[in-house]
Amino acid sequence: MEMILCKLGEVVLKGLNRRSFEDKLLSNLRRRVSRCGAFRVYSKQSTVYVEPADENCDLDAAFDACRRVFGVVAVSRATPCDKDVDAIVETAKTCLRAELSAAASFKVESKRADKTFPLTSIQLSQQVGGALHQAFPGCAVDVHDPALTVFLEIRDDAAFVHGPAVPGAGGLPLGMGGAAVTLLSGGIDSPVSSWMMAKRGAALEPVHFFSPPYTSEAAKDKVLALARALAPWCGRMRLQIVPFTEIQEEIRRRCPEDFFTLVMRRFMMRIAQRIADETGAKAIVTGECLGQVASQTMEALRVTEDAAELPVLRPLIGMDKEEIVRLSRKIGTFDTSILPYEDCCTVFTPRHPKTKPRLDEVRDAEAVLDADALVQRAMDGREFVRVKP
Ligand code: ATP
Ligand code: MG
């Protein structure tokens, strides 16, 4: 039966830790493909084999799932056939017809796990290569820099012909980088920043602040849709939705207007810190980017993160909007992100926000508020939503 091959990336560089990285990757892959049927998932020499256990498996869906598992750099399909040259040539002709017709050059690379096979790897590559060149004369043999490589593998049970590999998600297995609270708004940036940290192995605890009636039910649904769009990459998550209206109204009533946004962002940090304490997360992730808005200058970022103890990670800090948009399209969150709903950040925005705030003046501005009580009530009013791939 046809099966899927996943090539491991940085996992193989992990030296003594390799075993734990590989085990994590295998269990992540198993969980993801289990939705597509019964599969055997095992690794051999930097490759993970995802093999259907019966006829009811949805291989296309499993292939798509594998492409979104962090730690996998390339994914391909392998078609089995009898262990003889003619059968191998026929299989390659059929399943790689499009590729062999289109490529200017190719080579065949063989691996022989079954040492009783009568030909050496080199002999097999030469014979199959010769026959394929006859069948596709437009595709030259080039063993040094081929446009297409046809992989053959002779195993105990069958021979396998590999299709061309497509890029995987890259990165490191989810969960190997600890857990992080990620602040998820409805914008373009924060789904991308969340994805980037998940790619480096961080398990995510997404948190969203909402301010009814200033922000609508539709805005909340949008964030849920974004979390769902992230789930095929980031796995199961529990989105925490934090009521933020009281905090925002208090700030508007009692703090100087120029500091509204900064004080509000400090409250987001305090609450993120509390949630991290609860869940054991070791960092806070935001979609902030240097210079993008008034609250994202160096001075403003410093004032914001002062309210949290944990490191605040900002993977987008040095990216241009265009680069962020490109990633957002790639991961599948862009179309949802651009739906026109309000965010709590866009209610009560000051006319003249401070771009070079001083920490002491912001602390003074918020000193009139009972921060602990406000944070506690927001924590108590949380709603939890489970999100699955
Ligand atoms: P985004 O496109 O992610 O909304 P942005 O450029 O609009 O970002 P801000 O609105 O200033 O920037 O927000 C900066 C960061 O603060 C966001 O990337 C996100 O991590 C966090 N954030 C903003 N609003 C919310 C919210 N309502 N709930 C949770 N996090 C938020
Ligand atoms: Mg925003």
Image: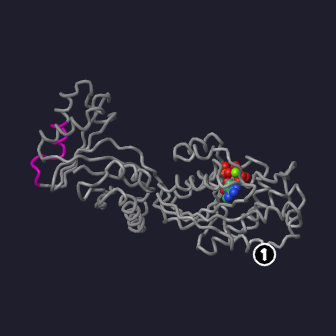
Dividing the image into four quarters, tell me where ligand 1 lies. Answer: bottom right
* Res 247 quadrant in image: bottom right
Most foreground residue, 346 or 143: 346
Ligand 1 has an atom within 8 Å of the beta carbon of the residue at disc 1: no
Residue 82 placement (x, y as % from top left): 13, 47
Residue 334 colored magenta? no
SS state under label 1: helix
Q: Residue at x 54, y 67 (%)?
A: 178
Q: Residue at x 27, y 44 (%)?
A: 162
Residue beneath disc 1: 373
Residue 241 placement (x, y as % from top left): 64, 64
* Res 368 quadrant in image: bottom right
Vertical relation: 361 (above or below) 324:
below
Disc 1: CA contacts within 10 A as few (<14), some (14-19) or many (>=20): few
Residue 198 placement (x, y as % from top left): 53, 58
Q: Is residue 190 visible?
A: yes
Vertical relation: 293 (above or below) 22:
above
Per the picture, the main secondary structure of the magenta-coloured stretch is: helix
Residue 320 placement (x, y as % from top left): 65, 42
Most foreground residue, 222 or 40: 222
Left or right of 346, for residue 109: left
Tag 1: amino acid = Ala
Residue 120 colored magenta? yes
Q: Is residue 289 visible?
A: no
In the rendered picture of this protein, how many numbered marks are placed on residues? 1
Which residues fall within the magenta stretch?
Answer: 116-128
